[in-house]
Amino acid sequence: MREPAIVVDPSEAIAADRRLVASVLAGEPGAFERLVRDHQGLCWHVIDRMVRHPDDTRELCQEAFLRVHQALRQYRGERALKSWIAQVAYSVACRHLEKKRIPIAGPADDDGPDLVERMSDGVDLEDAAADHEACGLLHAAIARLPPLQRTLLTLYHLDELPIGEISQITGLAEGTIKSHLFRSRKRLRALLEPSLGVFVA
Amino acid sequence: MNRRSPDSAPVTEADWLAQEQALAWPARRADALLAQALRSGPGSEPPPGFAAAVARQARATETRGAEDARVEQLLLAALMLALGLAVAGVLAWYGPRWWTLLHAVLGEGAAPWALAGAACLLLSWLPECARRRPAGPAPG
């Protein structure tokens, strides 16, 4: 359904990843900095969406890249380097949340407490009819989702990763990811339903 | 009674595709706004100079690691030397007594052969020990 923004030949992309990794392993000056620059956005998104704390995000993102640097010899070039790095970032963020005893996902059949109930506190949905306000309302609602659900929404919609790649990063089955995305989006949409009618093009 | 809420019902492929289609080509204002909000999240970005700072830190960690490894190798060599000297000392001190005892137990001709057999076992065991060195850390 969703179309990728840029079409890149996967084998070409993986060959480029292998070349970059080889440069880093050969100790070529600036190669690791290039690797970080190429993948810092995705790594940052994953960790930021999971932990939602600017200082922790910076520290954990650094930690993730240092782990990548230490373990780069283990990258076999069988899949995209960005997935491999995002997987390291996801696992660093999960460990951080576990240490702080913050639940990563809501219950299996739920995406956290009722969003409409929580968002109703102090927010008048009638007043949120303007697009800008409605988007702000939705962003606030996404921020209140459990870490896993908001990370899945970010990876799928903002970073435009295919479900298969998200599955590799998170270790979740594709059906589970679709379920989480479906339910989260249904709940988010329910926030707008009372105040918005049929779209007139 | 175990009642399931409508939200706990399994999501079918048809449900998923219908929702995907509604977000890709919105017919309703709510779908259009949701698609827009999902694509434009307020997520933060890494600060300027982040990549350079991480690369510097990785270099420093690598240098520190190499220094630690050198110190570790030196210590290991010193310990092996001390162990070798200790073994030589013990052999010099107790060797003649053990040799006499070995002759008495195994007989005059068998002692050198028993010693040669023990040396063979030691030689075949040492390379195996060297092969079983621990693997590096896994990421994550």
Image: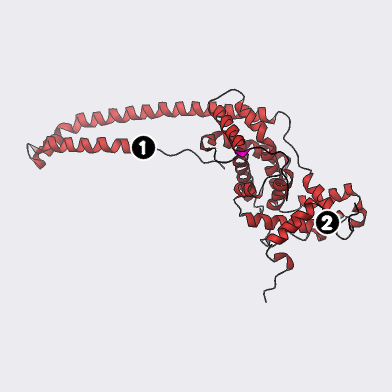
Look at mark 1 in the image and give the residue it sits on. Answer: B131
- In this rendering, the answer to whether B106 lies above or below A27 is below
* A137 in relation to A56, above or below: below
The answer to if A4 sits in the magenta stretch is yes
Query: Magenta stretch containing residue B132, yes or no?
Result: no
Q: Position of residue A44 (x, y in %)?
A: 69, 39
Q: Please provide percent x and percent y for residue A187.
A: 78, 58
Magenta-highlighted residues: A3-10
Which residue corresponds to the image point at 10% horizontal and 38% vertical from the top-left?
B110
User: Extreme bottom residue here?
Assistant: B1
Residue B98 placement (x, y as % from top left) = 16, 36
Q: Chain of mark 1?
A: B
Residue B49 lies in quadrant: top right
Residue bearing mark 2: A119
**SS at badge 1:** helix
Q: Chain of mark 2?
A: A
Mark 1 in CB contact with mark 2 (< 8 angstroms)? no
What amino acid is labelled 2 in the image? Met
Residue drawn at x 60%, y 32% is: A16
